[in-house]
């Protein structure tokens, strides 16, 4: 069994949860009895766009990386770097959007980070 995708998944999860914890510590405290402020509505569209771009780019790299084993046509290195940058942006987005550091959101960010890290490493490993 190849441990690289699992290590990538754990690394991505650590990055996402660590950023969420750091953002929580740096955020000003809300007064007692008041709910934390909601993120700006525009941030929802940004997150959707980031995730869509990451999904499309990673899917392209997985498909072309798989096909490159028989065709010999390999995607350029820049696309892999762009995929890693998009993956990092997707992982850091929950902390930048102001997601609260609660067990519910930490669990969601953990599972999301595992998925993103596993898929990113798999896309890179399929390159011949």
Image (cartoon, helix red, strand yellow):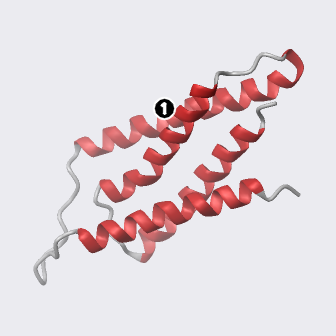
Front residue (pair 13, 39): 13
Residue depicted at x 57% and y 26%: 78
Kindly give the residue lying farthest to the bottom in the view shown: 32
Residue 25 placement (x, y as % from top left): 28, 74
- Name the quadrant of the C terminus: top right
Q: Residue at x 30, y 54 (%)?
A: 97
| 48 relative position to 36: left or right | right
Name the residue at 35% across, 59% down: 95
Q: Can you give x and y, in whole percent of width and height, for residue 64 in the image?
A: 73, 23
Q: Look at the picture and state if 126 lies above or below 74.
A: below
Q: Quadrant of residue 20?
A: bottom left
Q: Quadrant of residue 65?
A: top right
Horizontal and vertical percent for residue 57? 57, 30
In the rendered view, does 73 fall on the left or right side of 120?
right
Q: Secondary structure at mark 1?
A: helix
What residue would you read off at disc 1?
53
Position above or below: 109 against 59? below
Residue 66 percent coordinates (x, y): 80, 29
Q: Nearer the viewer, residue 62 or 2?
A: 2
Residue in the picture at 36% in, 72% down: 101
């Amino acid at each position: 069994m190849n441990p690289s995708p699992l290590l990538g998944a754990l690394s991505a999860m650590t990055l996402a949860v660590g950023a969420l914890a750091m953002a929580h510590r740096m955020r000003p405290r809300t007064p007692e009895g008041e709910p934390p402020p909601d993120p700006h509505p525009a941030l929802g569209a940004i997150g959707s766009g980031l995730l869509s771009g990451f999904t499309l780019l990673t899917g392209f790299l997985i498909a072309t990386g798989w096909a490159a084993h028989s065709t010999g046509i390999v995607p350029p290195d820049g696309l892999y770097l762009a995929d890693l940058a998009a993956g990092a942006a997707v992982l850091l987005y929950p902390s930048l959007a102001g997601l609260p550091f609660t067990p519910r959101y930490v669990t969601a960010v953990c599972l999301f980070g595992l998925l993103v890290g596993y898929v990113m490493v798999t896309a890179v490993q399929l390159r011949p």
